[in-house]
Every structure is written in C-alpha cells, then in structure tokens.
Image (tube, rainbow, N blue to C red):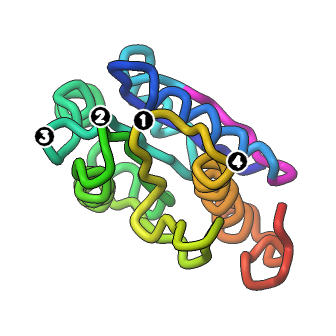
Amino acid sequence: MGKVLVLFDTASGNTRRMAEQVAKGAESVPGIEVRLKSVEEATADDILWCDGIAVGSPTNMGTISWRMKRWWDEVAGGIWGKVDGKIGCAFSSSGGWGGGAELTCMTLLTVLMNFGFLVFGVTDYVGKQFTLHYGAVLAGEPRSDNEIASCQRLGQRLAQWVAVYVDGNSGMHPLSGHTG
C-alpha cells in the first residue's frame, strides 16, 4: 500500500483548504494511505513514512513561507540523503493572480530535489486554460470547480505515480486511461 503525505503551511487557511483537496484527490486512488499534516505538527518521521509527498505553502513575496523553509532546514534536515527516490509535487496559494505562486511551487520543487525527491508536473488541463504544470496554484482558496479540480488532480496524479512506481501497479499509469 502506497503512502502519501500532504504537508502544508498556511497563514489565512487558504493553503490548508488546498491541502484538503489535494488529499481528497490522493484518496481517490485505490490502495493509497494519506496523511494530511501542517508544518507545525509534522515530523521528519512523516517524510520517512511516505512514498510520495505534496508540499504546499502560501506565497510570501514570491517564495515559500518562512515556516516552510524553517521546517525543511530544522526538522527535515536530519533525514537529508535518506529519502532519495520518493516522489514529490507542490502547490501554493497567493494573495492574487500574478503573486508568484508558480515561483513558490518551483522553490518547493527545488527543496524536494535537494532531498532527492523525484518531482513531476501535470500536463493535462482541468478546464479551459487551467493547468497545473508546476503544481496547483490559486489566488486565495479553492472555490471554482476548476480550482478544486486542480488541487484534486495534483493529489490524484501523485497517488497514481506512487501506485505505479512504489506499488508496481502499472494499470494506474495516467496514460493507461485509468482516472482513479
């Protein structure tokens, strides 16, 4: 059974609501166990436990929050080199469109790569002109159907990759036509 951790920081609650939708998407894939944790409650053991991780941060001045950065520096720093090959992706909420949420996702992906995670983008669209190539990005909380779908698709895709690469379930490969 594959294990997915959805790790997030939030200031206003918007990134938490995104995280809940990402977790819902991951849970839609059969055989996947999901943990949803904030940086205030997660430990390094949660990273060691998971096979795949979705990391979410509010966008602060075009980058990740200080709490998220501190978590990776101080809490997860001791497991650096012990998580090579796990799968990761990112999501972010900003105060407005153009606020830097994609930059925040790229920063989160860079952090994950530094720890040895294999990161991915999502090439399909969840609505007209609505994609999540670098991760799910929103202005505020997920409200519209497309915004909710983008968060859920990210979690679903992460769980599918865990099912394929960790559990050996090639039928869950996104190109196999299976949607969850």
Q: CA distance from mark 3 to mark 1?
A: 15 Å
Give me the residue at 32% from left, 35% from top: 58
State left or right for residue 169 relative to residue 10: right
Q: Quadrant of the C terminus?
A: bottom right
**Which of the pair 160/78 is nearer the observer?**
160
Please name the amino acid that badge 4 sits on: Ala
Say which residue label 3 marks.
61
Looking at numbered disc 2 in the image, what kind of residue is underneath it? Ala
Say whether residue 60 is magenta. Answer: no
Task: Give the foreground label among 2 and 3.
Answer: 3
- Is 81 drawn above or below residue 65 in the view shown? below
- Looking at the image, is mark 1 or mark 4 earlier in the sequence? 4
**98 above or below 47?**
below
Main SS of the magenta segment? strand
Q: Which residue is mark 2?
A: 76
Label 1 or label 2, whichever comes before in sequence order: 2
The residue labelled by disc 1 is 140
Image disc number at residue 67: none
Of mark 2 and mark 4, the one earlier in the sequence is 4
Name which quarter of the figure residue 9 lies in. Answer: top left
Asked if residue 92 is positioned above or below residue 19 in the image, the reply reads below
| Residue at 68% from the left image edge and 36% from the top image edge | 34
Q: x, y percentage for residue 52?
A: 55, 52
First along the sequence among labels 3 and 4? 4
Q: Which residues are magenta?
A: 29-36
Q: Are marks 2 and 3 in contact (CB under 8 Å)?
A: no
Report x, y in % for residue 8.
Answer: 42, 32
User: What kind of residue is marked 3?
Assistant: Met
